[in-house]
Image (tube, helix red, strand yellow):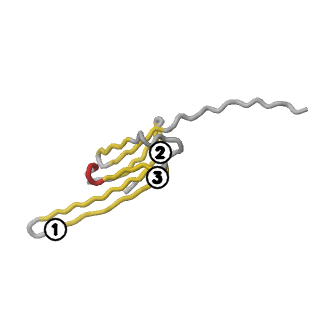
Amino acid sequence: MRVEDFEEGGRYIVRAEMPDIDPDKDVDITVASGRLTIRAARREERKDKHHSEFRYGSFLRTLTLPEGVDENDVQASYNNGILEVSVPLPAKEKGHRVPGQRGE
């Protein structure tokens, strides 16, 4: 499965292609110690009179979150076979100019 991660609109976003899964039953997303873990398993069984077919697979990916993110504000959605997990990035502190002093 393909996974991409990037920053957009003040959020860190992870997208994973996960077609043919039930996100309520087949996906487990956890955040702990600055790491995001996505686990998924797909199980499908088809049977007819003369034929049976099984399809299955599992997926595990762990990513390190950017420093300073709020681990309690993680959001996830699933749409058209794409799982998207996002977390707001901390505000970046603006640097300030430090004046130099002439030595004697």
Q: How many marks?
A: 3
Identified at 46% across, 35% down, the residue is 9
Q: Residue furthest left?
A: 49
Left or right of 63 in this view: 84: left
Q: Residue 29 in the image: state x and y as whole percent.
A: 37, 50
Q: Secondary structure at mark 3?
A: strand
Q: Residues within 10 Å of mark 3 (few under 14, many from 20)?
A: few
Give the Cα distance between marks 3 and 2. Answer: 12 Å
Q: Secondary structure at mark 2?
A: strand
Disc number lying in front (3 or 2)? 3
Q: Position of residue 58 (x, y in %)?
A: 33, 61
Which quadrant of the structure image shows residue 1?
bottom left
Callout 3 touching callout 2 (CB < 8 Å): no
| Residue 49 falls left or right of residue 14 | left
Q: Residue at x 14, y 65 (%)?
A: 47
Q: Nearer the viewer, residue 28 or 83?
A: 28
Residue 26 image-quadrant placement: bottom left
State the mark number for residue 6: 2
79 or 26, which lies in front? 26
Number of other residues with Cα within 10 Å of mark 1, as a class: few under 14, some 14 to 19, many 20 or more: few
User: Which residue corresponds to the image point at 39% horizontal and 50% vertical from the top-left?
Assistant: 30
Q: Please identify, in this view, whether the residue under mark 3 or under mark 1 is nearer the observer.
A: 3
Location of mark 3 (residue): 63
Residue 74 as seen in the image, left or right of residue 27: right
Q: Viewed as shown, does residue 56 lie left or right of 85?
A: left
Q: Amino acid at mark 3?
A: Leu
Q: Earlier in the sequence, mark 1 or mark 2?
A: 2
Mark 1: secondary structure: strand
Query: Earlier along the polypeptide chain: callout 3 or callout 1?
Result: 1
Query: Which residue is labeled 1 in the image?
Result: 52
Answer with mark 3 or mark 2, whichever residue precedes in sequence.
2
Q: CA distance from mark 1 to mark 2?
A: 41 Å
